Image (cartoon, rainbow, N blue to C red):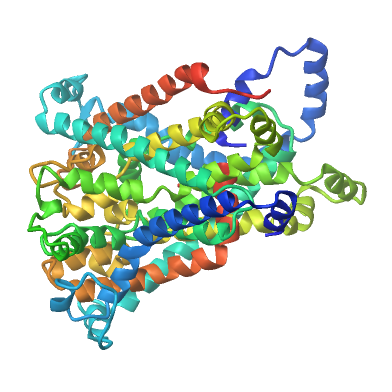
Amino acid sequence: MSAISELSKLRRTGPVTPEEKAARRKETSHDNKAGYLFLLPWLVGLFVFTLGPILASFYLSLTDYSLIQAPNFLGLDNYERMLTDDRLHQSLKVTLIYVGVGVPLQLALALGVAVLLNKGMRGLAFYRSVFYLPSMLGGSVAIALLWRQIFGTTGLVNQVLQLLGLDATTGYVSDPDYALWTLILLNVWTFGSPMVIFLAGLRQIPTMYYEAAALDGASRISQFMRITMPLLSPIIFFNLVLQIINAFQAFTQAFVVSNGTGGPSDSTLFYTLYLYEQGFTRFDMGYASAMAWLLLAIIATFTAVNFLLAKFWVFYDD
Amino acid sequence: MTETIAGEIDAPRTPADHARSLVKHAVLIAVSLLMIYPLLWMIVSSLRPTEVIFRAPGLWINELYLANYSEGWFALSQAFDWYLVNSLIVVSGAIIGNLISCSLAAYAFARLKFRLRGLWFAIMLMTIMIPIHVIVVPQYILFNAFDMVNTFLPLVLPKFVATDAFFVFLMVQFIRGIPRELDEAATIDGAGHLRIFGQVLIPLMIPALATTAIFTFIWTWSDFFTPLIYLTSPDMYTVPVALRSFLDATSGSNWGAMFAMSIVSLVPMFLAFLFGQKFLVKGIATTGGK
């Protein structure tokens, strides 16, 4: 169904006999030309805009390049510089908190609401739309501006708190203790898209399982733990991998809310924000490339660990 | 909807069921309200004088204050319609590019047998997961070398070579669901691959193409990172970058005008959401978009 399960399926194709291979080759030959012709635009894109840049990026990460002069080979200097770059460490910390807190909260809410919106429920289409809307608009600058106001000193949140008689005058987006949390909240608010995926997954679970469990007197909680969770685990896994990859790349909201600085006091300096600053305001393209490679390594590690851990909790029916 | 009725006939509802369902709806309505309150409040605030925004958490309006819209429209170096047109150019280019290039690649992956297909397919799947940050610096250098920075080309050209592999995958999945017999019948009638693709599959792929068009619309319309990097002169700004520059232009104080233009920027997305909902939900459920 998904790109992720598709990938694991590819690995699973077993050994092929020589006869099968020969038959396949025979069949293959006459489509070769047409195949590559149809694939041509994608192949051009792959080499010019993806694979080429990836290799170039790796080379650049070993150089000192400012766009004006030719790149100067430095070896591993850029990577060494990362070890002592305090702002880089800060950006890693901010991003890890954002991913580590934001993603589980978002997925838990998505799953919870999806389970509430069970099959045959009245108003399902309405609720689904209302919950999905924020996740569609959430990445836009308009919403980031809204967030800036809502959590500002005279913003909506303080207005409501004052209405409740509290003496609320904190500017949450301008207070280093709160700023990151408002962005995490923004991420949680966009739980609609994983929720829609959960809903599709829940629809695949046969009702007879629940009926049988109900006959056996299983409580709703044990039905959830013993039927829903295991059968939904591939979808939970898929959402987890996807949302982690997305969250590591979050940019717009932090950029707009902090006006591009990652402030206050670097409390919202997302990794991507710092990378943007190094690459496109300081034009330190070599260092930015090295940072991009560290990001790739981190995301790849998280994804690989996820796949390894999946063995222990993801349950495949086939 | 038919599901609801069937379910109710099967299982007669006890008072306890009713109570439970009432509680559930109450919870869901409360969460719904909390979810969309900020959006409703932004719409209302765009119709209020800025001083009122700072002390009105409610949603009632005494009188419509439309000055925010006229003020916001002309607050930047160009009138706001200029940026809307810029965005429209970029979005149209991206949609056309994605529809053509992704469907061609998808046809090859789903229907044609060629050497190394499995390898290319695996590579295609993996490119979906590569963070844009790894490729953005060399891409920038490339576009800079071709003197294309501060034009729309860096935003549109990649779409014509299927760099949004997510849509290739979406279309491959869709084509796999179309019976092969249709292609085979056309082959017997003497049709070549181009005709099978254009006359048999494309008409059947309308739902997948619509999903692609709508997602491309929404993502390109709200994309901020790429235009921020490539569009350097204010005349070239797309809507999100223009909106952001409001903060500098009005030093972040004219919230009324800022909200008014925020609403303007969200209207096309909202319309796409309204008309494309069916496709969006299906597309997201089967392949897991943002």
Q: Is residue A19 left or right of residue B6?
A: right
Height in image: A91 above or below A82? below
Looking at the picture, tell me which residue is in the foreground, B37 or B67: B37
Looking at the picture, tell me which residue is in the foreground, B124 or B114: B124
Height in image: A314 above or below B221? above
Q: What residue appears at the point 66 percent right and 27 percent down from the top-left corner?
A: A216
Q: In this view, does B105 lie to the left or right of B255?
A: right
Q: What residue appears at the point 54 percent right and 48 percent down from the top-left corner?
A: B284
Looking at the picture, tell me which residue is in the foreground, A64 or B189: B189
Q: Residue furthest bottom?
A: B63
Q: Residue furthest right?
A: B188
Percent x, y of residue B265:
35, 69
Q: Which residue lies furthest to the front in this view?
A: B15
Percent x, y of residue A235:
54, 34
Height in image: B248 above or below A85? below
Percent x, y of residue A146:
25, 62
Percent x, y of residue A112:
45, 42
Whether residue B238 is visible here, answered yes or no, is no
Whether residue B88 is visible here, answered yes or no, is yes
Q: Quadrant of residue A177?
A: top left
Q: Is residue B184 left or right of residue B201?
A: right
Which quadrant is home to the N terminus of chain B?
bottom right
Q: In which quarter of the image is residue A30?
A: top right
Q: What residue appears at the point 74 percent right and 56 percent down from the top-left corner?
A: B204
The tally of labels here is 0
